[in-house]
Every structure is written in structure tokens, then in C-alpha cells.
Image: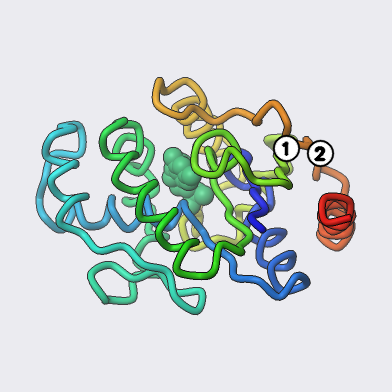
């Protein structure tokens, strides 16, 4: 089964999705890392990130894979490199092109097929576009200030003040949720969970309950 975990930046998706995958004994896929790796490839190619055709060419020429928690770009481990602030600043631009998304989404679906069709898949459009038939969909939300506090320890946010991180998160959420192609929004059949005041274990327990119901 596929469990989809969507929501805005810094809401705790990765932590929750990883713990959930471990509890269920199925693979975990970080789809944001695919868009980040593509952004890195665009930067390395010296391509113009605002030129959809140029980004599409890079997307078609890039092999994106995720193995053992590591993001691979053409076979090279780029897990840390994709967390760089320069990548974070451009990823919303690169990921907004519909044709580019089609290429990346196909790679994500292929990945899940290669893993036996069972995975916890984390992103922005997983429940709405990538796996609309998934039997369990959750959409996590949390206050922006709390999300900024959680992000403060991330590499991308290193050295920034919490207020600046919050500003960046809000800007990225705005871009992600107002783009035309697969905007960030909950699927109609997603269960929305506010994680502002909930510890990770409780969020995971809630979702495990949903999985149990779905497999009854
Ligand atoms: O989850 P993240 O912060 O690593 O995601 C980085 C960016 O990638 C996010 O701002 C929007 C984009 N993204 C997307 O458009 N669709 C997804 N399924 C996952 C991420």
C-alpha cells in the first residue's frame, strides 16, 4: 500500500514519514529531494532556472534515484548538497513547470513500482496527483512560527534567525500553493493533522490507526 504524507515546508513530514515507514516495514520516499536534486542539476548545468524548456532538458537528461535514504543524481550521492540554501532558494521555481513535473512524477511512480508498490511517500502533491488512489492520505499542518523553530536546526537554515526562516517558509509556501501545476493543497480524501502541539510519536500513532482501518 501507498501512504501519502503531504503538507507545507517544516511541518514535520520527513520525521513522521520516516518513522511511519519504519513502523510499517515499508520503504520511504522523499519526493522533495527529487526536485532538489533536479535544481542542483540545473545549477550545475549552468541552465536558466526560469526557462522551462531548459529545465525540462536537464530533467530528461538526469537520472534521479533514492536509495537507503540517500538521494542520487546520475549515481552520485547528493543528499547533503541538495539541502544547500542556494538549492532551497530555487527549488520552487524549478518545480513549478508542468512538463518538468510530469518527468519527475514518472520517476517517482517508477520508484514505487520498483519497490513493490509499497511505500510511505512524502511531498506536496502525492495525495492529489502522484498517487490519487492511495488508501491512506494525510496532510500535515502546523503554525508557521512552530515550523520555523523546527527548521532552525536544518542545514539549509544554518546561521539564520528564526524570524528569517519563517519569512522564507511563508514565501516558499506561497509559491508552492499558488502555482498552477499541482499546487500544494490537501486531497479531498486526506486526513488533515495539526502537528503544532503534537509529538511525533502521537502523529505516527494516529496515522498507524488510519492504516489499520484501511487494511481492515
Ligand atoms: O520537502 P522539501 O522542502 O525538500 O521540498 C522542496 C521543494 O520541492 C518544495 O518547496 C516544493 C517542491 N516539491 C514539489 O513541488 N512537489 C513535491 N511532491 C515535493 C516537493
Task: Give percent across and percent down for residue 202.
Answer: 89, 57
For residue 66, above or below residue 51:
below
Neighbour class for label 2 at 10 Å: few (<14), some, many (≥20)? some
Task: Give percent across and percent down for residue 108.
Answer: 42, 55
Q: Is residue 98 visible?
A: yes
C-alpha distance separating marks 2 and 1: 5 Å
Depth check: give the residue in front, 187 or 31: 187
| Label 1 beta carbon less than 8 Å to ligand 1 | no
Depth check: give the residue in front, 32 or 91: 32
Q: Is residue 42 left or right of residue 165?
A: left
Toward which corner of the image does residue 139 lie, by quadrant?
Answer: top right
For residue 28, above or below residue 123:
below
Tell me the residue that label 2 is attached to. Answer: 194
Neighbour class for label 1 at 10 Å: few (<14), some, many (≥20)? many
Task: Give percent across and percent down for residue 112.
Answer: 49, 61
Identified at 67% across, 53% down, the residue is 3
Q: Is residue 199 visible?
A: no
Identify the image quadrant of the C terminus.
bottom right
Element under disc 1: strand
What is the residue that sits farthest to the bottom in this orientation?
68
Identified at 15% across, 32% down, the residue is 51
Are the two marked residues, 2 and 1, in contact with CB atoms closer than 8 angstroms?
yes
Identified at 28% across, 67% down, the residue is 73
Task: Give percent across and percent down for residue 159.
Answer: 49, 57
Identified at 40% across, 26% down, the residue is 181
| Residue 141: assigned label | 1
Identify the image quadrant of the N terminus.
bottom right
Toward which corner of the image does residue 102 lie, by quadrant?
Answer: top left
| Residue 115: assigned label | none
Q: Is residue 105 left or right of residue 20?
A: left
What is the residue that sits farthest to the front in this orientation?
216
Element under disc 2: strand
Amino acid at each position: 500500500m501507498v501512504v501519502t504524507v503531504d503538507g507545507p515546508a517544516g511541518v514535520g513530514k520527513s520525521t513522521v514519514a520516516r518513522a511511519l515507514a519504519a513502523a510499517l516495514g515499508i520503504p520511504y520516499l522523499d519526493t522533495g529531494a527529487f526536485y532538489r536534486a533536479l535544481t542542483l542539476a540545473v545549477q550545475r548545468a549552468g541552465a536558466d532556472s526560469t526557462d522551462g524548456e531548459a529545465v525540462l532538458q536537464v530533467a530528461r537528461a538526469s537520472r534521479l534515484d533514492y536509495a537507503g535514504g540517500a538521494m542520487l543524481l546520475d549515481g552520485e550521492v547528493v543528499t547533503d548538497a541538495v539541502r544547500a540554501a542556494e538549492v532551497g532558494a530555487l527549488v520552487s521555481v524549478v518545480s513549478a513547470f508542468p512538463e518538468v513535473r510530469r518527468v519527475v512524477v514518472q520517476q517517482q511512480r517508477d520508484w514505487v513500482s520498483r519497490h513493490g508498490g509499497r511505500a510511505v511517500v512524502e511531498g506536496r502533491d502525492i495525495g492529489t496527483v502522484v498517487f490519487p488512489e492511495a488508501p491512506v492520505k494525510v496532510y500535515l499542518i502546523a503554525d508557521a512560527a512552530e515550523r520555523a523553530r523546527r527548521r532552525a536546526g536544518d542545514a539549509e537554515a544554518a546561521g539564520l534567525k528564526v524570524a528569517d526562516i519563517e519569512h522564507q517558509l511563508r514565501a516558499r509556501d506561497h509559491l508552492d500553493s499558488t502555482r498552477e501545476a499541482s499546487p500544494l493543497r490537501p486531497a479531498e480524501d486526506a486526513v488533515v493533522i495539526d502537528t503544532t502541539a503534537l509529538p511525533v510519536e502521537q502523529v505516527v500513532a494516529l496515522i498507524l490507526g488510519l492504516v489499520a482501518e484501511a487494511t481492515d
